[in-house]
Amino acid sequence: MAKIFCVANQKGGVGKTTSAVNLAAGLAKVGQRVLLVDLDPQGNATMGSGVDKRQLELSVYDVLLESASIQEAAIFSEKCGYHVLGANRELAGAEVELVDLERRDQRLKLALEVADKDFDFVLIDCPPSLSMLTLNGLCAAHGVIVPMQCEYFALEGLTDLVNTIKQVHANLNPDLKIIGLLRVMFDPRITLQQQVSEQLKSHFGDKVFNTVIPRNVRLAEAPSYGLPGVVFDPSAKGSQAFVEFARELVQRIPTL
């Protein structure tokens, strides 16, 4: 049975897509069958996985409108080693089209149920806003992985996200919970970041992943080559941290 996780944070610019594509590549490296679902109309996770969003014949848009299955629409990225259910600007129109449809918040969940045996992990890259697309992701998922920077404003954004997850848990998806917080873009030289990191650990305990992703130039460069950092430069500190994170996530699965 596939484990379905949203990579979500309502604060923009926290490395959410970077975390999603590198975790997907890291999981593929440690032998897992992975599907990355891009729910953001910008299509950054699609392009960052070596798939050209302009060339997509079928996308997540077709899956949400039930005109294609995941098996038909997902593309295997040879370079990255995982499947991608891509997105492009068409997806922005899905917001409007879904409003009048039945089960509008369950479309992705129903599509993933059919493809359940094909994958070990499904990672959903959600847009930063709480939209019908994000809601589809949260309704389909078993849990949420929250990438966050160790800064004061990030803590405020986390409060909003926790409240959203509570509401979805109460009303739409009783399985949904926070799987863990992933500290990203971490610079141990900055005292404030160390302080916020300690605050997170004291408040959330084992909900904070042990792996910390350092601030890393190679991770930032990788998207311009259409690859995750894990594939672009496997020896970089950031890439190694994501592979370590993938291992930690696999180990945690039995306890979730």
Image (cartoon, rainbow, N blue to C red):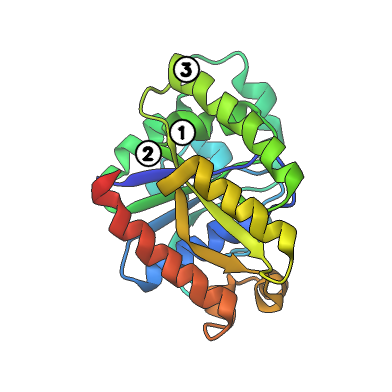
Q: Position of residue 141 (x, y in %)?
A: 42, 36
Residue under the image location 65 percent in, 29 percent down: 160
Residue under the image location 61 percent in, 32 percent down: 161
Residue under the image location 42 percent in, 38 percent down: 143
Circle 1 sits on which residue?
Answer: 108
Q: Nearer the viewer, residue 24 or 246?
A: 246
Q: Nearer the viewer, residue 59 or 214?
A: 214
Position of 242 compared to 134: left or right? left
Circle 3 sits on which residue?
Answer: 103
CB-based contact (under 8 Å), mark 1 and mark 2: yes
Q: Position of residue 38 (x, y in %)?
A: 57, 48
Q: Nearer the viewer, residue 57 or 90?
A: 90
Q: Quadrant of the N terminus?
A: top left
Residue under the image location 59 percent in, 42 percent down: 126
User: If you read the primary sequence from the N terminus, does the residue marked by circle 3 or circle 2 appear first?
Assistant: 3
Circle 2 sits on which residue?
Answer: 112
